[in-house]
Image (cartoon, helix red, strand yellow):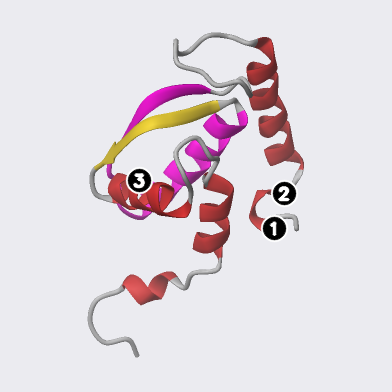
Amino acid sequence: MENRYITGKEIEDIVKEAEEIKNSRKLFSDVYDDRGNQYVDLVQEGGGVLGIALVGYTYILEKAGIRFYSLAGTSAGSINTLLMAGVGKPGEATAERIIEIMGDKDFFDFVDGLQE
């Protein structure tokens, strides 16, 4: 099933560039697997609601063949870190599933206080 949040020409072009990076076998790490994925540590910072961009960032890194050995984050970065750790096993691409989860979430559920 196609994820409706990551479709469109602009996104497809960016994904294609990321896949070209993976196919070029450019080295980013000395830790890799038999599928050509390279492993790095990922530390994500905060950013409030703008921290949602971290999900897109990790999505493109995953398309480029980057996987994450260790995860850490603060504030919004810790939310994405938690989702990445909870959605999949180490070495699995998780961002596409997280995009789907977040796209289906009503963000007003996070608002404190009364809603009128």
Question: Residue 49's spot in the image, x, y percent?
Answer: 36, 55
For the view shown, which residue lies furthest in the bottom direction?
A: 116
Query: Mark 2 to mark 3: distance in Å?
Result: 24 Å
Image-based side of 38 in relation to 54, left or right: right
The amino acid type found where label 3 is placed reads: Thr
Mark 2 / mark 3, whichever is N-terminal: 2
Q: Which residue is mark 2?
A: 7
Considering the image in quadrants, where does the N terminus appear? Answer: bottom right
Task: Specify the label residue 54 is tagged with.
Answer: none
Image-based side of 72 in relation to 66, left or right: left
Question: Residue 11's spot in the image, x, y percent?
Answer: 68, 40
Please provide the residue range marked out in magenta. Answer: 38-63
Task: Specify the label residue 4 is tagged with.
Answer: 1
Q: Is residue 78 above or below residue 26?
A: below
Secondary structure found at label 3: helix
Q: Residue at x 72, y 49 (%)?
A: 7
